[in-house]
Amino acid sequence: MNSISRTLCLLGAVLSLFVLLLGYPSPSARADGGAPQLAYVAGAAPGVSIIDIAKQRVTGSFALSGDPHAILLSPDGSMLYVTQPGLGRVAVIAAKTGKTLCTASLPGQPSLLALKLDATVLYVAGRGDTSVRALNPMNCAVEHTFETHSPIYGLAVTASTAPDATPSTPNQLWITGASALTVFEVNGHLLGTVPIADGPQYICIPGLFTAYVTTRQGTVVAVDLNTRQVIRTLLRGGPFGTMDYDATTGEVYVPDQQRDQLDVLAPVALDTPATTQEPARVLPLSGSPQAVAITNDGGLGFVALSNGQVLMLDIPERKMVASFVVGGTPHFIITGTYPPGDSLPQQAVPSSSLVSSLSGPLLILSAALVGFLVLGALLLFGRWSWQRSAARKRL
């Protein structure tokens, strides 16, 4: 192999390395606002308080009036959806700056939220009205109304439970009313109702099999999503707060306000033996829990207490690791993806952002090497062309 061939081969190798470097994702990439490692608390003294999970401290807040209740986070971490029942509205807020992007004034003191699984529709309701509004989260425009003929106490969205469901089959909207659950397809088609004698309140749906429902009479019941029948009563002696679940185990965490603890429910299905003891375990707390949020990896739990505190729990170790004072009367808490590197819904980072996230020296060195080798190859090619031309003249 001559020197020109060797140089061209080396040039190709360096160019390939450079392309790989440009396409390699930076481990420090974050969604807008840093939401992958933040928790947001609605009902704190400022309105919304922000907790940095890694730093284990309150790092900011958004001043929001109207007693913010429910709060959700867009999958890319860029927007917060917040109900403000005291003002009769729901707001979409930039998670990074706290700037209000749009609002919708709605009847019934809206305090409940749910998000369509593809995040294209936001569902809003309150106990002072009998309808659920479907909003476009980009401009807060009302696109559809679901009439339930009953005050509304809870909302949840799940994928279709139909036996022949496909990814294009519409999601289902589950609504808790005064005496029953009402189930719609999100296109507006009514699927049915599930009577619950104790009066349903909050609802949590971890997967495609079971819904967990607290009641206003202080019980927690399991409802089969396919048959839409109550499986059995799991807990008594409430009241109970807003629930969450561990996405890795399917366990459901229930704020037990009567006993100042979290009741942890093992997954229940229609064929689960009735002899299974519930709760599977309890986590004692230092106050009355209003809501709980479990990080996507099941490692940490955040519990909002009625005394204005938020507790951070190590779930596997079953112990408290930090406590935060946010003031007010916390109603709800939501966490972004944690740990940040997990491959759960986050904002896709385009290649131009990846380039900018590479370390400066590495990028400069790669560019310098490519430039040097290209120049060398051109010089060698020119010399080879001159030598060949001279040889022809001698002939």
Image (spheres, rainbow, N blue to C red):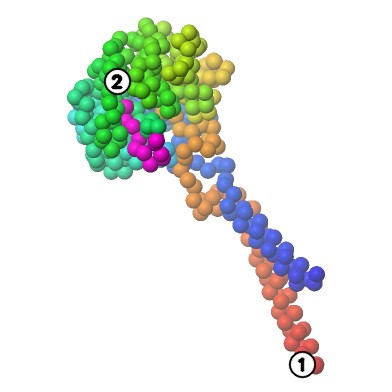
Residue at left 66%, top 56%? 17
Residue at left 22%, top 22%? 151
Magenta region: which residues? Answer: 164-174
Residue 316, picture quadrant: top right
Residue 393 is tagged as 1
Crowding near the residue tagged with mark 1, few <14, some 14–19, many ≥20 C-alpha atoms within 10 Å: few
Mark 1 residue type: Lys
Q: x%, y% of residue 27?
A: 57, 42
Q: Which residue is mark 2?
A: 194
Q: Which of label 1 and label 2 is nearer to you? A: 2
Nearest the eye: 7 or 158: 158
Element at badge 1? Answer: helix
Residue at left 46%, top 38%? 345
In the image: residue 206, left or right of residue 135? right
Indicate whether 228 appears above or below 34.
above
Crowding near the residue tagged with mark 2, few <14, some 14–19, many ≥20 C-alpha atoms within 10 Å: some
Mark 2 residue type: Val
